[in-house]
Image (tube, rainbow, N blue to C red):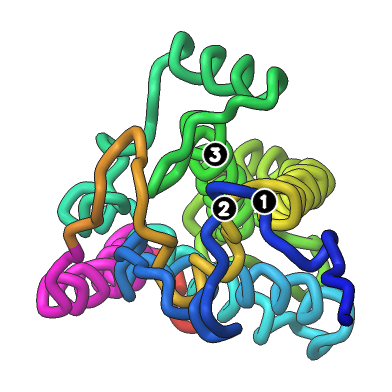
Amino acid sequence: MSVRDPAASPAPGIAVPRDAGAAAARPTTLAWDLPTRLSKWTLAVLVGLAFASRYYGDANLVWHMWNGLAILVVLVFRLLWGVVGGSTARFAGFVAGPRAVVGYVAGLLKGRPRHYLGHNPAGGWMVVALLVLVGAQAVTGLFTTDDIMIDGPMVRVAAGWVVERASVLHQDLFQYLLVLLGLHVAANLAYSLLGRDNLVLAMLSGRKPAGHYVDVASATPGSIARAIACLAMAVALVFGGIALAGGKPFP
């Protein structure tokens, strides 16, 4: 007579998948559209390359300057996409007020986090902070000089005090950017490993498990044609703006 192992039996009321593939078949819903994901990962790669090109690039930092201009293009695109893009990409959809941020953090600390399909209130402000800091780093780079052989694209048309101040800020802001990036990565990894949502995977695939979310049940993707128009506009604004201001748009 065989003895059934109690540990192998499911508790009453708990449904057990018929096979291992059942978990993989769990329905998902769109969280972030393709342009949003591409801009995020492109910006992440460009910031990493900016560090590499600064310390391991060519002596005249031409690669580094092209890198900075590319960052500005992606930032301008993201700002435009934050107005006309998909529902979870729009700033109006994820930049919340202080009360919402405090309420979300309080629920998180109590072990009862509210789940958002897009960015949660705290994460939304992290996105804004990163965009502002990366933008400040890129803009100050336009006016940076080493007073020897390297001049940013806008140095020749800027006042001396502007160039001096921008050169100092360009060096100093990078330290704060590293700290903020570290917090962002750590928070995403912690939420992915300990929380219900795998944010890293969701930002790669664009999808999250279907379920109840505080903001929306499913995202509405932005138009690809509109994304291409935003990208073209971003390129024109960055390079055209530098040229019209009398700078050197092409390093």
164 vs 130, left or right, is right
Judged from this view, the residue extending furthest toward the top is: 99
Q: Magenta residues?
A: 221-246
Q: Is residue 167 depicted above or below 67 in this figure?
A: above
Q: Of residues 53 and 217, which is closer to you in this image?
A: 217
| Nearer mark to the viewer, of 3 and 2 | 2
Residue 103: x %, y % from top left: 52, 14
Residue 65: x %, y % from top left: 62, 75
Identify the secondary structure beneath mark 3.
Answer: helix
Question: Are discs 2 and 1 less than 8 Å apart at CB?
Answer: yes
Q: Which residue is mark 1?
A: 11
Of the residues shown, which amino acid type is indicated by label 2? Ile
Q: Which residue is mark 3?
A: 123
Instruction: Identify the residue shown where x is 46% and y is 9%.
Output: 99
Instruction: Identify the residue shown where x is 58% and y is 46%.
Output: 130
Q: Give the image quarter of residue 200.
A: bottom right
Instruction: Identify the residue shown where x is 47% and y is 30%.
Output: 121
- Quadrant of the drawing holding the C terminus: bottom right
Instruction: Report crowding for label 3: few under 14, some 14 to 19, many 20 or more residues within 10 A (C-alpha).
Output: some
How far is mark 1 from mark 3, CA to CA? 37 Å
Q: Which residue is mark 2?
A: 14
